[in-house]
Image (cartoon, grey):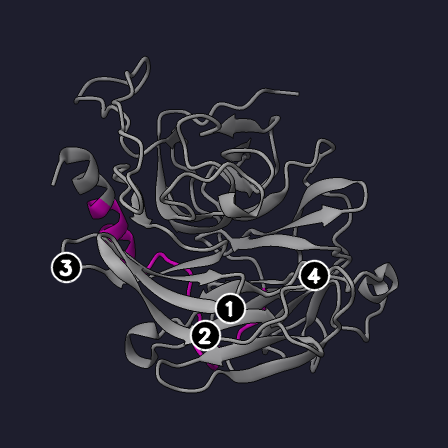
Amino acid sequence: MGPVVRSVALLAAACLLAGGCASFPDEPPPTSWSAQPQLTPQAGPRPELPGEYQSSPGQNGQNQTPQSVPPPQGCKDFNPGVIATCLNTVTGVAPIGGDSNGGVAAYATERGGRLLKVTKDVDPVVVAQIEVDASTDGGLTGLAISATFAEDQLAYVYVTTATDNRVLRIAPGDTPKPILTGIPKGPSGNRGVLASDRKGSLLVATGDAGNPALAADPNSLAGKVLRIDGSGKPAQGNPTAGSAVVAAGLRLPGGLCVSGDTTKVWVTDWAAAGDVVYRVTAGQPLGDPAWRWTDRPGVMGCASLSDVLWVSTAKMAGFQNLPMNAAGAITGKPEPAMQENGYGLLGPMEMLNDSAALVGTVNKAGGQPVSSDDRVALITRQGPPGGTKD
């Protein structure tokens, strides 16, 4: 194992051992959804491609010379950050432990309805095949795992069926069980995404089913950020007792993420006036976006690190860096990363720790796929995050 592969593997393994990955138990603790003391931000390095030259001690990571990575041969990808290859459009990623070589094992979902276990240099294992309706912008579009995954092996997915959108709970070898049903389905606006709130509950972002009035209707589950427990009931500590709704006003959400210290919750959306990312505050309207992209790069997954928000894009190669301060305010214009020599178009993103994230590619859904697409891969960072001041 080379130094780059080893560093990526150790980084991911450290995240898993430290419990820094997204998780939630079936039953949440009886706590309110309030802000926690903020962490002191670390120095924010720039995103770094796996396979890039690693600086030696004393170097500042600047003026590095990328190593050449051979093009893939069939399903064999030589980029050391790649964990899985030759998948269909990837819609969810979640780390589930380490492999025998100290690397990352993960769950991944495909829009067509498969939940897979993926491990580097091992053929993907089908955990579940779910019948979904992917005729619109729905299908199997969201994934999260239980906080007690090592014991219960539970995963949660967001799916479009013939009649509605819903959340399912999946245990290996068992039939997927619906825990939240009746989310409106329409000719569009069916995509939904999942995330852990890192406090024991599950966050669900739903589309508006093609009807903006539903997003504004407090009695509808469409166009909302919801917070539920592992059985699908409204989580304890929600703004309105007995209601799963914590925020409203979404159109077609692409990603949902929570910072490691739980103080910042973000949701991306393909809004009517452009792609946006909102800071979510429970019980308050989404309001003005934290950032809006009028060029519509197709914002999808996100990772809220200590001093930067990463946002993946499904219509523009690479992802966006949004520098932010300790309070979570965006302090500069987005800076694109990995637009060249990267993984192409990206969909889901899941933070591993403050220096790395898992991503899934969506090149088969409109990009320029290589022979090993679609893929699950790691991205890491080093050096200052940059960002252009307004």
Q: Disc 2 versus disc 1: distance between alpha carbons?
A: 6 Å
Q: Disc 3 versus disc 4: distance between alpha carbons?
A: 40 Å
**Disc 3 crowd, CA 10 A, few/some/many (<14, 14-19, 20+):** few
N-terminal-most mark, 2 or 4: 2
User: Percent x, y for residue 264?
Assistant: 56, 51
**Disc 2 crowd, CA 10 A, few/some/many (<14, 14-19, 20+):** some
- Residue 134 vs 298, above or below: the answer is below
Give the amino acid at mark 2. Answer: Gln
N-terminal-most mark, 2 or 3: 3
Residue drawn at the location 50% of the way across and 43% of the way down: 363
Q: Disc 2 versus disc 4: distance between alpha carbons?
A: 19 Å
- Residue 333 vs 283, above or below: the answer is above
Q: Looking at the image, can residue 353 be seen?
A: no
Give the amino acid at mark 4. Answer: Thr
- Residue 146 vs 124, above or below: the answer is below
* Left or right of 288 in this view: 102: left
SS under mark 2: strand
Residue drawn at the location 28% of the way across and 16% of the way down: 65
Residue drawn at the location 39% of the way across and 81% of the way down: 171
N-terminal-most mark, 2 or 1: 1
Residue annotated with mark 3: 100
Residue annotated with mark 2: 129
* Left or right of 146 in this view: 287: right
Residue annotated with mark 4: 136
Q: Disc 2 versus disc 3: distance between alpha carbons?
A: 26 Å
- Residue 384 vs 170, above or below: the answer is above
User: Percent x, y for residue 359?
Assistant: 43, 47
N-terminal-most mark, 3 or 4: 3
Q: Is residue 236 magenta?
A: no
